[in-house]
Amino acid sequence: MRIGIDLGGTKISIIALDDEGGISFESRIKTPQNDYRGTICALHDLVNAAETAAGQRGSVGLGMPGSLSPRSGLVQNANSTWLNGQPLKDDLQDALSREIRLANDANCFALSEATDGAARDHNSVFGVILGTGCGGGLIQNKQLINGPRNITGEWGHVPLPWATPSEHPGPSCWCGQQGCMETFVSGPAISADHRQHTGQHYPASELHQRAKKGDRQALASFDRHTSRLARGLAMVVNIYDPDIIVLGGGLSQMPHLYEQLPTAIAPYIFADDKTVLIAPPLHGDASGVRGAAWLWNENS
């Protein structure tokens, strides 16, 4: 049995998969906010509940915001800031009395879709998370690509490419820089951009509903978002040249992205073939937690 956990800033999801990828247990709870020890206890209790329900012990994989620093072993770059600087892997292994595997949550999403999802028939995959933040994971031959700093795929914290004068230097990012992709293409970024242009404050989900009803200001906000997302994705294509891009996170449920992005991305592709395959996730919201479980497929 493979147990996967998706540790998010607002919720923790857990799933237990059998050898065929079938679900034998799943649950979801609120994340203990700003409480590191409470988070460890919650993760321990969830694993215990999964194993009690299934009647067997399982391997444990964890998808997390940020990553573990290979140098220190401590959490780095997590927007759930109470995790930063903490020995999450060591503490959770002590709590569960076993080895566990951890990866960035966007990496887990990409691994899930490459293993048995929308990208299962492709060799090279870029998995994108578009939600409250912006992340990415790179897959080659169904294995994660990890660099010496464990930050491969962190396209959310590079500058918006081909920025216009009105987009430069860009909004401030929690990472300390300005103009990061996350400040332009995440859900909160859409809302902030719309407020800047109109003075109206709506969450991205409500703006999407307004756009579907023909609201011109909402449509204009999503046009700007699509352009910025296309430029960011084109940058990755020009560097990595993946077979397929799979979108995940809350914004991936917006159909217009799959209709508009292939055309919007084409002018920035440095090749005569400017077609880019962009797909929604097969497993939807469950992809991240499934990918955490599939961490035990790698090198095992």
Image (spheres, grey):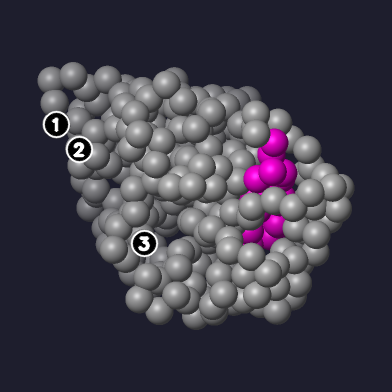
Residue 150, placed above or below residue 300: below
Q: CA distance from mark 2 to mark 3?
A: 21 Å
Q: Amino acid at mark 1?
A: Phe
**Which residue matches tag 1?**
270
Q: Secondary structure at mark 1?
A: loop
Whole-percent x, y for residue 73 in the image: 44, 75
Q: Amino acid at mark 2?
A: Asn
Q: State if disc 1 and disc 3 touch (CB < 8 Å).
A: no
Which quadrant does the N terminus fall into?
A: top right
Tell which of 215 and 241 is nearer to you: 241
The residue segment tinted magenta is: 1-18
Magenta region's main secondary structure? strand
Give the mark, 2 or 3, whose residue is nearer the N terminus.
3
Q: State if disc 2 and disc 1 touch (CB < 8 Å).
A: yes
**Which residue matches tag 2?**
238
Q: Which mark lies nearer to you, 3 or 1?
A: 3
**Which residue matches tag 3?**
150
The residue at 20%/37% (across/down) is 238
Whole-percent x, y for residue 63 in the image: 56, 55
Q: State if disc 3 and disc 2 touch (CB < 8 Å).
A: no
The residue at 54%/79% (across/down) is 86
